[in-house]
Amino acid sequence: MRKVIFLLSIFMFFFKTSATANYEKKIYDFSIESIAGEIINFKEYKNKVILIVNTASYCGFTKQYDELQELWDLYKEKGLIVLGVPSNSFNQEKNNNADVKKFCEVNFNIKFPLTTIIEVKGKNAHEVFKWAKENHGKSAEPKWNFHKILINKEGKVEDTFASFTKPMSKKIIEAIENIL
């Protein structure tokens, strides 16, 4: 019996979920710079569902921009914010915001908000990504480009999705619809 309890304790430690997070801050306590240089204050997104996606122009997953735009078009009127976060954390992004913005508009007709190019992992990560990891665990830290972090209407991390999970996948659609 002790062995079972010990193994269960170890299992619970390694698979800690956001339910154990104390959330001293919520997403609404942060802001981030837009690709155009304006401040995006997350307070403006109160009572909305936010899908934060770290993006890159030279990644094999870059085609996901099409599905991110489709997701935005389908759910923005219902309260979904898709936020693209260009990052060079994996050495696959353009050198400046103007080039990223032009790339997204010309190649994918992106209309959802984009941020300035930022770091998404490690000690230089933007505070939003540090917050997500601190409160949701390692699954919130991007392992590669097009990692997705879903924030619920309470301003907490609801779920995370790996890069290979397409934005229009059943898994992401169901998660969004369940919290909209």
Image (spheres, rainbow, N blue to C red):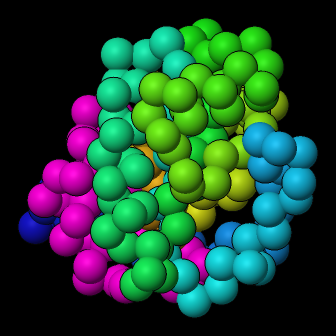
The answer, for residue 71, to whether it is visible in the render is yes
Q: In the displayed structure, does residue 39 sit left or right of residue 85?
A: right
- Residue 159 covered by magenta stretch: yes
Residue 109 image position (x, y, % from top left): 48, 40
Occupied quadrant, residue 154: bottom right
- The quadrant of the rendering that contains the N terminus is bottom left
Q: In the displayed structure, does residue 175 sit left or right of residue 87?
A: left
Residue 107 image position (x, y, % from top left): 46, 26
Residue appearing at x 17%, y 59% in the figure: 171
Against 86, residue 3 (above or below) is: below
Extent of the magenta region: 153-180
The answer, for residue 89, to whether it is visible in the render is no
Residue appearing at x 27%, y 70% in the figure: 175
Residue 20 image position (x, y, % from top left): 49, 74
Residue appearing at x 40%, y 50% in the figure: 69
Please state which of residues 26 and 42 is positioned toward the viewer in this rendering: 42
Occupied quadrant, residue 63: top left
Against 48, residue 167 (above or below) is: above
Residue appearing at x 26%, y 79% in the figure: 177
Please state which of residues 18 and 144 is positioned toward the viewer in this rendering: 144
- The quadrant of the rendering that contains the C terminus is bottom left
Against 108, residue 75 (above or below) is: below
Residue 49 image position (x, y, % from top left): 48, 76
Occupied quadrant, residue 115: top right
Please state which of residues 64 and 132 is positioned toward the viewer in this rendering: 64
How many numbered dots are placed on residues in this image? Answer: 0
Against 127, residue 28 (above or below) is: below
- Residue 69 covered by magenta stretch: no
Please state which of residues 73 and 64 is positioned toward the viewer in this rendering: 73
